[in-house]
Image (spheres, rainbow, N blue to C red):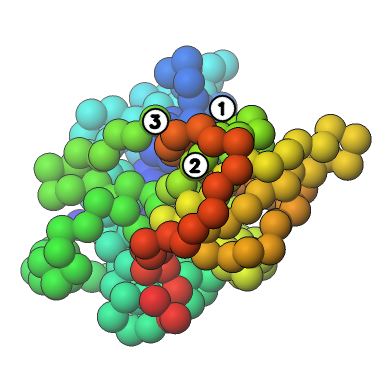
Amino acid sequence: MHSSTTENYLKHLLLLQQRQEDGAPVPTGRLASSLEITPGTATVMVKGMAESGLMDYESHSGVRLTAVGERLALDVLRRHRLVELFLVQVLGLDWSEVHEEAEVLEHAVSEKVLERIDILLGRPGFDPHGDPIPNAAGELASRQLARLDECEPGQRVQVSQVENQDPAFLRFADAKGLTPGALLTILARDAMADAITLSRDDSAEPLVIGTAAARKVRVVHLESTPQRKGRAAGQAGRSKRA
């Protein structure tokens, strides 16, 4: 059984690696920033984990997970995201508050309890924020997602993932209806105002948001249409109102 500190290092490094498109090692300073610790502290810990066979460390390049480390990291990520979904769907917590709770519970939940949670939730593939949940074999669902701020007028999209876990942003996204499952049409992009105008299937009112906010929302492309009317069939559960 690994310590919660070790598990946190593994999980954070996995998430950083997933954002490295070129597969290069993650700089130790970036890992330290993600963990909100000093680079010196991170370096000491990383060296110890490299000696344990969980990471490969190169002083001038950075760090990456070994096969063993990656498997353990995926297990921690699985626990975290299943716990988040359980807290939302079963206990009724708001999706903006479950991340911090899951940060604690992910280190305490047993495999037996986790399996029961997985069965109870119907073997889900995604957490309340649209992040993929690794299955018991450590496999992640693959999707082709686009950033909302990159979409063009006339495109029809469905929200799949909200990347930012900050509670304030999640409350903002919830208030604007930018939650997983929401169906949108891009109406206009205003470069001068740095804003995007959208229409939602479940609202007659157009929605204007800044591109900085839209950058944090990932979508899948549907058909393109100049205008549309109608209402969504529904949205995925992601808050205490779900």
The amino acid type of the residue labelled 1 equals Pro
- Give coordinates of residue 101: x percent, y percent: 43, 73
For residue 165, what is the image quadrant? Answer: bottom right
Sequence order check: which comes first, mark 3 or mark 1?
Answer: 1
Instruction: Return the x and y of residue 77 as percentages of the image width and height.
Output: 32, 51
Q: Nearer the viewer, residue 196 or 240?
A: 196
Amino acid residing under circle 3? Gln
Circle 3 sits in a helix, a strand or a loop, which is it? loop
> Residue 170: horizontal and vertical position, in percent?
58, 64
Which residue is under mark 3?
Answer: 144
Q: Secondary structure at mark 2?
A: strand
Identify the residue shown where x is 14% and y is 72%.
120
Would residue 147 be seen by someone viewing this image from the given angle? no
- Please provide percent x and percent y for residue 58: 47, 19
Write the residue at 38% across / 83% down. Answer: 92
- Asked if residue 181 shows in the view, the reply is yes
Image point (13%, 49%), residue name: 136
Give the spatial CA distance, label 1 vs label 2: 35 Å
Q: Is tag 3's residue or tag 2's residue first in the polypeptide sequence?
A: 3
Where does label 2 land, which residue? 157
- Residue type for callout 2: Val
Categorize mark 2 by other alpha carbons within 10 Å: few (<14), some (14-19), many (20+). Answer: many
Residue beneath disc 1: 27
Q: How busy is the neighbourhood of tag 3: few (under 14 within 10 Å), some, or many (20 plus)?
A: few
Q: Quadrant of residue 113?
A: bottom left
Above or below, 207 relative to 95: above
